[in-house]
Structure formats: structure tokens, C-alpha cells
Image (cartoon, grey):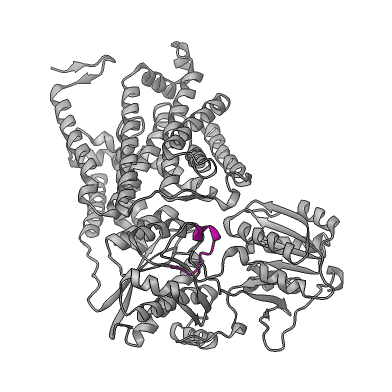
Amino acid sequence: MKRVLMGKLLLVFTVSLFLLGTVAVRAHAAQDKILLGAAISMTGKFAREGGELKGGYDFWRDWVNGRGGMDVGGKKYKVEIIYYDDKSDTMTAAKLTEKLITEDKVNFLLAPYSSGIAFATSAIAERYGYITIAGAANSDALYERGYKYLFSLLPPASHDFNATADLLSRQKPAPKTVAILALDSLLTILSTDGLRNHIKTLGLQEVYYTKFPAKTTDFSAMLTVIKAKNPDLVFFGGYFEDSVPFLKQCKELNVNAKAFAFLTAPQFEDWVKILGKDGDYAFSVMYWARAMNWKGPYFDVKSFADTFQKQTGTPMRLYHAQGAAGCVLLQIAIEKAGTLNQAKVRDVLSKMDVTTFWGPFKADEKGKNIKGRIAILQVQHGKTVSVDPADPGAKVWYPTPPWDKR
Amino acid sequence: MAERDRLGRKTTAGGAWATRTVFGVLLLAAFLVPLALRGYWVRLLANVFMFGILAQGVNIIAGYCGYLALGNILFFGLGAYVTAVLMTHFGVPFPVAFAASGAGAVIFSAGIGLLILRLKGQYFLMATLALSELMREVISSLDITGGGRGLTLPMFTGGAATVNNFFYYLMLLLMLACTFCIWLIDRSYLGLAFKAIKFDEDAASVMGINPPPYKTAAWAISSLFTGFAGSAFAYWMGYIDPGVVFEITPSIKMYLMMVLGGAGTVWGPVAGALFIELVSELAWSRFMEYQFLIVGSILILTCLFTPKGLMDLVGKKFTWSLFTKGIRENKI
């Protein structure tokens, strides 16, 4: 009898959930509001990056609403953002983008995290004539599809390592040989492919190149070959979880070079926590650094970080800035166009030559930001220091001493 | 008076008419959907149909034959990559690449099936998972597949509605074709042989059924469905990389759909795909923060109420005892 009763209760619970779900009504955007939509990774493998990007969008929304809203043709519009979780999944992101456009009828879209997801969502946005300002998707191939409504905030991924190679080629004693390792994934391969072409123009010789699969933890075979080749520079195209064991094993196998250059890993706090003094001398690529000192119409680099901290109560991180920068760029274009018409705002964006707190923006005919800059950081005394452009008093530590003399 | 079909199963004329009428109405509705609904719903249903195809693929090898091919996503990825490579590197039109994807999946499954279909139970399951990972690594290391960078396919030309409608009808027709194929198998001696292998392979051998060719045939048909779905998916998305098309989650999802709808039934996997996708959709759109909790709870409860799948409810009266029977049998 008890079992039967429990069964009935469970059935009622299930049916109730359905009914509750179907009758729930979300409030629609009121008039005099600009409705933005974002399908963004809140769960899954990109949850951390997606969460920070969302933090940047939220900050900008609150900031712009605090100023009375966006000025469009002399009228102030408050901003509202609809968020959906794409679960770090391409297909879900595509579905949600279509929902934002056709069901929610948003005025503008905010971009997702990662080039892989942006491939699918930008294709849908393009077909509906919706603008995508990709704040965190800079795969070169994204911009080779002839799209008219897709713009990149970042410089192309194939340029990621070039500034580091430029900086190191100017150091004394001049490097001559290079070893390159690349994680077999979209962005890392693009970065290292770009580097391999670029070092030829600098007169550097590639003595070793290899790709390695994701989740590689043992680099000893590769390092044994590198040690025999004795390159001046080692470029490692991998993420944080690859870069840390790589450098640890460099020390264990006593593999030395005049410089070890990474993509973004050394800029994370955990780099120093895990590697301690061994993490010093490592170079890192950064799309944005305080030393760049960009000044925009609403913020400069410092005031953005300060305002973010004050408004949200959390320290500003890179993807917060990327998210907010994409929104600021859209805001400038909308206000300049004086309309919410996608085609007209798109025309403004394609001709715009502007500098925001994030840096310069000028799109080529493919939507790539040809004025995008990259900063080079180096870990010195356990802290990341911008060496190009240089923080006040900062100098490049070069060459890197051998492991037994550090 | 009940009649019997050529395999000796009971049929009733009245029941058949009711079923045909319902089926006809649903089919007509499915074909009219793009005329009545907007882009998002069309895309959502196309997604459901794609999972219907994948679940039918698993249904043949696992539901009918009893071989748990959890790594069936292997053929999805293979089909996607055959299409992507042919279209990007050789300029092959989509229909040809689509056909080649199905053929490639069948050739691969038939070849490898002769070896690994000797394994049974969890060993076969693990072997298919390992194969899927192996294929992912191979494709990640080849230049022609773009390695970890993936491949960008030529864009389907046309407006949003044209693209959505094309893939909607493609997935719908493909799912119907797969289901029709399973319906034919279900009514044939091939289907009986599959079921005999599922229930007792040794006994089936004694009765004159030579299991290896039947099992290979089942896996080849399964891979054909899955390879076609992979091909359509690649062209639909416009970009693929190994992480996307060899992802294990859809593999588990297609299994769940088959089990929930009714393993070894003609329409069960389709019902399962529809149920799971629509429940997931309702859950995230209404209760985003609790979506996983809600979907998980509903799936567990559904399995408890109808342990043989949703198709087991067809033709039965919806009474309290029907549901509580499921609970009693599962000893809650």
C-alpha cells in the first residue's frame, strides 16, 4: 500500500514539474530597451572562460544602464541581456543562437567563447544578418568564409607568437635556432603555424618541430631530441595544463635555452604557485596589459580595471575585459549609427577606426582586427611583468640562465 | 478475431487502422512543421530527428542483437570526416560525399566487426569505446583531416529558412528511412535471427543461425545510419574537429534514448529521442539552474515507471496500476 502511495506521489511530482515548466512565462523586454542575447558557456569545459566573459557583459550592462542607457538617435535605451548556457557544446550553441534571433527577437547578439563554437553561431548570425563581435574567437579560418557581419576584437591567432619572436630576435646574444612544440588543437596549431612562417622573415632557423596530442603529460621523448639539437629559443604552443609539466620536465632533464616562450600559461597565478622560482624567465602572450595604456572614449586601461573592481567587487580578469570591450565596441557603433538597424550598424563597424580601453580596432574586409596588438609578459621574481610594451622600469630578462645556475 | 502475420504474431484489423491513422497524422504534421514554425523549432526538431537516427543505429546492434556498441559515435565521426575531407579537399558535391560517408562507415564496420564482434558483453562495449578513441587520435594526427584544427566545410548557400528546411527534411527523411528499414528487419527472418542472437547466441547457433555474419550485418546497418547522420551533421554545422564529432556524450545519449523509448522496438528509439530532447528543452528553458537535476529526475522516474520503455505503454490503458506496477517490479 505504501509503495502504491509513493508511486502516486512520484507521478504527481513529475507531472507538476511539467505543468510548472509549461506555464512559466518569461517577461518580455519592455519598450525603450535594447535586448541583447548571449548563448555562452556556463557549464562544460569552457565554463571558466565563459563565466568571465559573462561577467564582462554584465559589468557593461550595469555600467551603461547606470548612465541612463545607450544613446540611439537622441533617445536613451536601457540594456537587457538574455543568457543561455550553451554547455560548451557547438550544437547547443547553434540552437540557442537561433532561439535568440527567432524566438526572443533580440536586437543584437553577444558572442560565445571559443572559435569552435563561434564557427557555428556566426554562420547562423550571418544568415539572419546579425552582427557578431567575437571577443574571444580569433581563429584565422573563422574570417576566411566571406562573412560580412563577423568582426574580431583580437588580432588573428596566427599572429599570437609573432610579437614574442620579434622581441627575442632583438636580444643579445642574438638567437639563431628555434624549437617549436604544438598541442594538436585549433588555436595552438594556428599560433605555431604562424610562428613557423614568421621566423623565416627574422632569419631564425627551425631545428625542431612537433605536434603533441591533448592530455600529454610526458614530454621526455621530445625533450631528449630538443636537448640534442640545443636550440636558442623554445616556443611551446600549449595550454596551462600542458605548459606546467613541460617546464618541470625541462628542469628534470636539464634542457636549457636562451628563452622559453609560452602562449598564455605563465600569466595565471597558479604558474608561480606550482613552479615557484622555476617559473621565472618564462614569456607569455597577452592580448591586453596595463602597460599598453590604451585610452578610449569611456575608459582607459586603469579606469576600466578600477571601475570593474568597484562595481562588481571582484578583481578584473582578462576575459572580463574582453567581454566588456566587445560590448563597448558595439555601443560605439550603435550610437554612431544612431539606429538599431543591423546593416547600418554593420556599415559603421566596417569603417570604424577607433581605440577603446582594449586597444585599437580597425577591421579589414574579412572582419579581422588588423590593428589589434599583443603584449609580451615575462615572469620575474614570481610576478608577471609586461616587457613589451614595458612596465615602468621593466627590462627583458635574457638570456635565461641554465637550470643549475638559477 | 485476431489474425496472425507471416511470423505468427497476433494482429487486429481495428488496431492496425488506429495505428495507421495516428501515424499518418503525425507524419503529415512532421512534413508541415517548417511551414508553421519558426527557425528555432525547425532546428530543434531537426536535432531530435538526428538523435532519432543515432538511436536507431544503436537499436539495431544493441536493441535487436544485444551487442552494446557504446562507442558507436565512431561512425558518426567517420561519416562527418569523410564528407568534410571530400568536400573541402576534392570539391565533391554533398550528395556524393553523403553516400561515400555511409559506404565508408559500412566498409569500416564490416571489416573491423569481423574481428571485434567475437567479443561479448562488457568486452565488446570496451572495445567499441577504445576504437572510437583510436579513430579520434588517428584523425587528430592526419594532415588531410586538419588534425586538431578541424575542417571548415563549404557553406550551404541560401537564407536561414532554406538552410533550416533542407536539414530538417534531410534528417526527417533519413530517420524515417532508418525506421522503415528497422520495420522491415523486424518483420523478417533477419530480425528473428538478431533477436535469437540477443537472447542466447549459443542456442541460436544450435538452431542453425551462424552468428558472425548476422552480427556483422547488424553492425554494418547500424554504422550506415550513424555515418549518414555524421555526414549531414558536418555539412549542417559547417565546421568539425575531433573533439566535436567524437564526443562521448552523444554516444551515451543515443543509448539512453533507445532504452527509454524501448530497446528492440521499431519506434522506441524515435520516441526516446523525442522525449529526452523535449524534456531537456523544457527543463533548460524554464529552470536553467536546475536543468540537470530535473532532467535526471524525470529520466530516472520514467525508467522506473516504464522499465521496458515508452513503447511498452502503447495500447495500454493509463491507469494508476500501470504506473505503480513498474514501481513494484523495480522494488522501490
Residue A70 located left or right of residue B240: left
How many marks on residues?
0
Q: Identify which residue is drawn at 23% across, 70% down.
A: A27
A13 in relation to B255, above or below: below
Residue A140 falls inside the magenta stretch: yes
Q: Identify which residue is drawn at 73% across, 54% down.
A: A209
Q: Identify which residue is drawn at 48% across, 15% down.
A: B210
Q: Nearer the viewer, residue A10 or B49?
A: B49
Percent x, y of residue A190: 61, 59
Magenta-colored span: A133-144
Residue A226 located left or right of residue B185: right
Q: Quadrant of the N terminus of chain A?
A: top left
Percent x, y of residue B241: 53, 50
> Quadrant of residue B54 in the image?
top left
Residue B4 located left or right of residue A193: left
Q: Quadrant of the C terminus of chain A?
A: bottom right
> Quadrant of residue A179 in the image?
bottom right
